[in-house]
Image: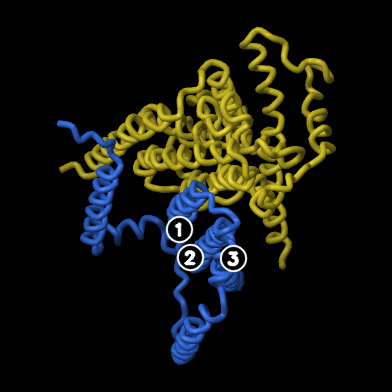
Amino acid sequence: MGTALAFYLASAIAVIASARVITSANPVHALLYLVVSLLAVAMIFFSLGAPFAAALEMIVYAGAIMVLFVFVVMMLNLGSAVIEQEKQWLSPRAWAGPAILSLMLLVELFRSIGMESDHMVNTATIGPKAVGVSLFGPYVLAVELASMLLLSAMVAAWHLGRPNDHKE
Amino acid sequence: MDQTFLMVAFWAVFKALVILFGSVVIAAFLSFVERRLLALWQDRHGPNRAGPFGLLQLPADMIKMFFKEDWTPPFVDVLTFWIAPGIAMAGLLIAFIVVPVAPDWVVADLDIGLLFFFAMAGLAVYAVMFAGWSSNNKYALLGGVRSTAQTVSYEVFMGLSLMGIVMVTGSFNMTDIVNAQKDCWFVFPQFLGFITFAIAGVAVAHRSPFDLPEAEQELAAGFHTEYSGMKWGMFFVGEYVGVLLVSALLTVLFFGGWLPPFQWFVFDYIPPFFWFAAKTCFFIMLFILIRAALPRPRYDQIMDFGWKICLPITLVNLVGTAAVVLLLHNPA
């Protein structure tokens, strides 16, 4: 009962915050709502019995990636001109088409969930140890591939950021 | 609802409230303690006029802060300007719910206790960022930018520095970590982890010598230049909450929390909370002494120190601990 309440409350917050991310014209306010939305998603994970995933969502997405997003927006310090531009871009002509199409997808999703109403969500709590065992057991190849991808990204970032010394 | 359930719930809420008010009051009181101790070490008097030993200085400051005009400048971005002090105070204060101050005295004994602290420390950086950006002022923005880069850099190895402990204990739970130190405090096998976590903790609480976001000489007051009254007070208390939290975590993670230093029959009569409080006080004093003793380094030196010295040390510590744990558990 308490878990279901937490789940629906967090989901409602996530949906509202995500809608505000799109409709907010000020870039920093939009990012603030995106942080709230990510925190709500972390709460959803928590209520579904995945505390480790919830903690990682908060540390990695809300605590690190979004910080860098806000950092870049802060450095650019876009003024009121951008806010005016955003307001113009948010005309009904721009969002009506995608909105109708995604509404159709939503109806389809509701119908498919409604057909399998006997399939309940499993709320057994998965601790950090279980996540680690499966990451380094059946999914070890994916972990290794991801680590290689990150290493190559780091080398590329170093290459781009190194001082310009072309004289031999 | 039977009687025992109500009693348990009431007791849990009572403990949570005691820890909440205790940490806020101690954090506020630290401002007075710090000024007196700095004065002592620098051969001055410090605030000694209000009340005996100047003890009433804190109430006097609070009255001043409450009744000062809380001015919101017309050029700021109001939403983020108002949210920032709240995040500054709440962010690290919430992290106290995973700190066990005595056996059974912990608000939420989460299985992911340590990760919860990392999450809260990661969110606390928004306070300085939003304060710096919303103030719409070059000094404040520079403070916010510095703070972001510094915190993101130091959080990377703050997480890694504690993974050695997690590996040895086999759990993120804070109570398990304290109980695993019955025979030997983690400061001895995890000395490198202790040093790097202490440095990262000071940096994340942006205390001197890592107080570049608010370096008075260069940036006026940095990110809180435009703040006044109670909002400024929340930033001020938030900084001391950070000091208190980092000291408490150093105690819990590396110095055995509420455990006495060694087994002796007299120690059975001393309540466990005493040990926790004494060790935490020691670290608070240490942080104040560091502020009194060390000059502030340059900004690029701080970034270099984090990425080129501390991060490799924590990685070596991590790999070394992993090797030892593997050897002890799988004698091949």
Label 3 or label 1, whichever comes before in sequence order: 3
Is residue B47 rendered to the left or right of residue B312?
A: right
Residue type at tag 2: Phe
* Residue B38 picture quarter: top right
Q: Residue A45 — which label?
A: 2
Q: Chain letter of disc 3? A: A
Q: Are marks 3 and 2 in contact (CB under 8 Å)?
A: no
Give neighbour class at mark 2: few <14, some 14-19, many 20+ (Cα, 10 Å). Answer: some
Which residue ends up furthest to the top in the rendered image? B43
Q: Residue A57 — which label?
A: 1
Quarter in which the C terminus of chain B is drawn: top left
Q: Nearer the viewer, mark 2 or mark 1?
A: 1
Quarter in which the N terminus of chain B is drawn: bottom right
* Residue B286 picture quarter: top right
Residue nearest the viewer, comparing B171 with B192: B192
Residue under numbered circle 3: A24
Residue nearest the viewer, comparing B45 with B8: B45
Residue type at tag 1: Glu
